[in-house]
Structures are given as structure tokens and as C-alpha cells.
Image: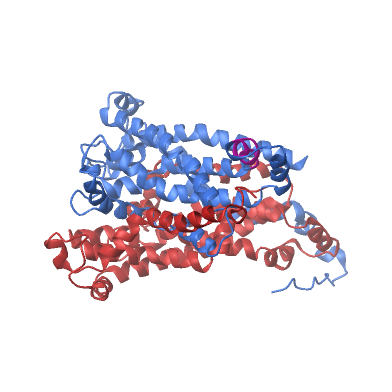
Chain colours: A blue, B red
Amino acid sequence: MAVAPVVPDRHPPAFARRGWYRRNEIALTPWLFLAPGVLFFTVYVVLPIFQSFGISLYRWDGLGEATYIGLANYRELTTDRAFEISLWNNLRWLVLYLLAIPLGLGIALFLNQTVTGIRLYKSLFFFPFVISQVVVGLVFSWFYLPNAGLLNLILGWFGVSLNVLGDPDLATYGIIVAGLWPQTAYCMILYLTGLNAVDPEQVEAARLDGAKGWKMLWYVIVPQLRPATFIAFVVTIIGALRSFDLISIMTNGGPFGSTRVLSFYMYEKALAEFGFRMGYGAAIAVILFLIMLCFIAYFLWSIWREERGGRG
Amino acid sequence: MFPTPIQKRSPAAQIAYQSMLPLALLLWLLPLLAVMAFSARPDADFTTGNYWGWPSSFEGVANYTLVFTSEMPRYLLNSFLITIPTVIGTIALSCMTGFALGIYRFRGNILIFFMFIAGNFVPFQILMVPVRDLTIDLNLYDTRAGLILFHIAFQTGFCTLFMRNFIRQLPFPLIEAARVEGVAEWRIFVYVVLPLMKPAIAALSVLVFTFIWNDYFWAIVLTQGPDTQPVTAGITSFNSQFRAAYHLMSAGSIVAALPPVAMFFLMQRHFIAGLTLGAVK
């Protein structure tokens, strides 16, 4: 549909139509357009955050009466061994997940050529990201299978055998590797787009000055990729703290609770086998939220700086 | 261009690169290829432990047929019935919020914008208990509608960010010209801005489709059973039904993953435009 011809209002008796709405149209319109979206978002996202803070102060099984217990849930957290393990695993996720950024950059540099069929290669490298985490989890848990898995077939050639997901010391790392697979693909596509926009003149100028290889990459290319790196950082941090699907599918928290993270432990406490401890679950969620809030604040601050700069 | 175009390198390097490409891809997709190989094997191979040798027969057709005669088609249908209304609802809401935040200057604009961005980053678990309660109170627990309403609300955050930034890049004089002509504001939205937003709408539709199709957490929190659950949640019950029947579980997973993959390959340009928004200044 092309831009429709703009038809001027052909009802001249102005005073008849210049009602209160007409006079305040520009001030009112944005609020009318915002109303449904803001209402939905407030009811389903903003208010629940505060409600969760409230619920975390109660003992509640989700059905009966809730009992106010103050900070007792939080006090219990400090002595909860499973909570401590989850917290450490979250840290492992955060640190190791960031590997997706350099890995993605590496693959992007490898694929940033113009040979025949490269477009298809790029798509195929990217497509783990399109698959649901549930399927990624299944794919990797079969890959890791002690007898039937492809990993052990390959390791067998070197006389090694591993039960990745059955070993409490290895399982979390095994799941993180599975998570890195789609995440690296995402970072790769960000960097491929970024590399596309790198200023060729700057590269040529740097080349004339004798820059090449790593020096060129670090001092000329990477600084120009800053916007891509920022987004890669944001989505990777969020992805790391949101990890739930893979854990639920691959190990369900085990073996011996060694692969729990806060998001998964919260779900377990509130809805799964431990019985419905909504208050305690909410307290775990609040901790996770506060961790995330540090990053959210940083992201918002960066975006805000950008906005101000953009308007000049 | 960086790195140096391979055409400017020695012939040996060119050959090395050309042969490394397929190898690297093979390595990258290895876990997936293994599952594909599983899905074509007969049951007998798994009982005799012949996992990686030559299959004793090719049962791809039989395995996939079995998947489609199980509960799987119901789960797939649910996925579509959840995903498509969510896409429509989200796009509708975020076109409007994006328009309001992108075009008008008013007190609180940036605050509302930041509320959408921040909400979008929040961990799901902090919403879980209240959203589940709300859904139960609305009598929508274990219905597709309950899931759809939440998805629309949550995705509106990301989509507003996207739409607003997109609208900011449109030529503003266009809107001013329409105003000078005395065109009502809602008409400006419908006749001037909306037609220009088609690329953004396309990009977001594909993205939201993929996000919602792949959602697992909310599916298990807000629904249960084959009447309502989408395929991501359904696949776990499918798998417990065919425990250790790797050929069927593999085939099932591939079927479950297929629609977003198809969407991606069909709408690749839009998909990538959506994902890489902001990656370039």
C-alpha cells in the first residue's frame, strides 16, 4: 500500500469541530496510543515485580492463607546449601557464557569473505540460534550419552570416556557448552553485520601504516565494532542469567543438585517437587532480580548516554 | 575489508580456505547431524548397540510417520494457535506504543520508554508467581489464551524498543507536512507512518514468532497437558512416552524445531535485520 493521499479536513466551520479533544490533540494522542500497551505491560510485568517482593515476605503454599514472616525466607537462604550452589553456578554461567563474544567474533572473521556459497555457510552457522533451547538441550544430551553419544565415540578413539552429564563436577560445564552453541551463533551474526559496516578507508589507511593481523584487529577493527559488542554483551548476560530450559531438559538440576542455578532452583521450590513454597521461591527470584538489576542499570545508563548524545 | 579478502592471498591459501569451510561447518553442526542420523535408524540398531555403524535399514519415513500419528500434531497445532495470535497482538500494541514514543515529545516519554526496556530484561522468575496467580484468577490457567495474553504483554517491551527506534529514523518532515494539512493524528498513524513501518513489522513478526515458538518456561508454568501445551513442553511428554527410543525422540525433536527454522530460511533478511538492530550505528 502506497502512502495514501493526505486528505485535508473539508469541514470549515471550525468552532463546531474544535472540541476539547481537537484542541489538545497533540498532547492527548500519545497517551491514547500508549494506553493499551502500557496497561498490558504494567499488569503482566511491572506490578508482578513488586508483588514478588511482597510475596517473598510470606509463607504461602499458593492456595491457602499466606502468613507474614518478615525476612525469614531470606534468613533461610543464607544457610541453604542448594542456594549457595545455585549462586556459584550462576557465576560460572555468567563468566563462561561471555566466551560466546570472542568465539562469535572469531567465526565472523572466518566467514567474512566473498567466496561462492558463503551466504549459505553464514546461514547454516547461524541456525543453531533459531532452534529452541529445548531441542538444543535434547541434541546435546544425546551427544553426551555415555554409550550411544557421538562425543564418546570420538573420545573413544583416544581411549577416553566421559559421562559429562552424570558427573557433578562436569555437568554444569557440559550444559554451558550446549548454551554457548546458539549464543555464539547470535554473537557471530552481530559481528558479521558490524564487520560489514567497518569503514574500508580506515582499514586501508591502517594497512598503509603497516598495521596487520592482531594489531589491526585490536586497534582498528574492534573499536569500530563497539555497538555490536555492546549488544552481544547485553544479550549474553541476559541469556546467562535466564538459563533455565537447558538445565531443565538436560539434567533437571542433577546430578545431586549440582547443576541448579537460581532461575531453576526458584522454579523447583515454588512449583516442582519440593511442594509449593511460593514465598521462598519469590525470595530466590528477588535475589536473581537484584543481580540482574545491576546489569539492567548499566545497560539503561549506556542507552541513556547514547540518547542524549544522539539528540545533540 | 577485514580480514584481507582471500582472493588476494596465495592460491594455496585459497584452496585451504575453501576446504576448511565445509569442514568447519561439519564440526559446528555435528551434534545436530548426529540427531538427524539417529532419526533415520530402525529400533533394532539401538537394542543391538549399533549406534554409529552403518544402519541395518533406513527407517526415516516410518519414524517420522510415527511421530505424526502420536500426540505431536496436537502440540504443533497448539504452538501455532499460541504463536500466531501473540505475533498479531504484539505487533498491534507495539506499533502504537512505538508511534507514541517515537513521534511525540512529552513529559515522561523517556521514562516510559525505559520502563519497556528494563521490563524486557527482567528474569522470568520474578514474574512467575504473580503471573501464575493472575492467570488462575482470570480463569485462564491451562488455556492458550492465558499464555497468549502474557506473551503479548512481555514481548511488547522488546517490540516497543524496536518500533520506537525505527520510527525515530523516519523523516519527521513527513509528519509535520501532514499536520500542516490538518490531518488528524490517528490518520497520520494509519496513513503516513504505518505504511512506512512494513520492514519493521516484517522483522518483528519473524522474531516474535521464533521467540514464542521456542518458549518453554511459560509453557510449563501456565499450561499442562496436550490440550493446551505447545510443542516445546509437549516434547518432554512425547519423550517420556518413547523413553530410550532414540530414533523416535530424534525425529520428534526435529519436527518440533522445524517451523522456526523454515521461518528463518524463508525470511532471512528480515530476521537478521531484526536481530542486529543497533549493531551498526
Q: Nearer the viewer, residue B144 or B261?
A: B261
- The answer to whether A166 is drawn above or below residue B190 in the figure is above
State the residue in front, B250 or B9: B9
Where on the picture, by quarter, is residue A217? top right
- Segment tinted magenta in the rendering: A215-224
Would residue B165 be found to the left or right of residue A90 on screen? right
Residue under the point 36% across and 26% down: A70
Asked whether residue A159 appears in the rendered view, the answer is: yes
Residue B11, image x, y percentages: 55, 56
The answer to whether A65 is drawn above or below residue B234 in the figure is above
Residue ranking furthest to the left: B48
Which residue is located at x 66 percent, y 55 percent?
Answer: B166
Q: Above or below — where is B94 with respect to A82?
A: below
What is the x, y in percent for residue B215? 40, 55
Q: Position of residue B205 (x, y in %)?
A: 54, 63
In the image, taking residue B240 as reference, residue B276 lies left or right, namely: right
Task: Give the residue displayed 66% in from the left and 63% down from the top.
Answer: B197
Instruction: Please tell me which residue lies in front, A278 or B206.
Output: B206
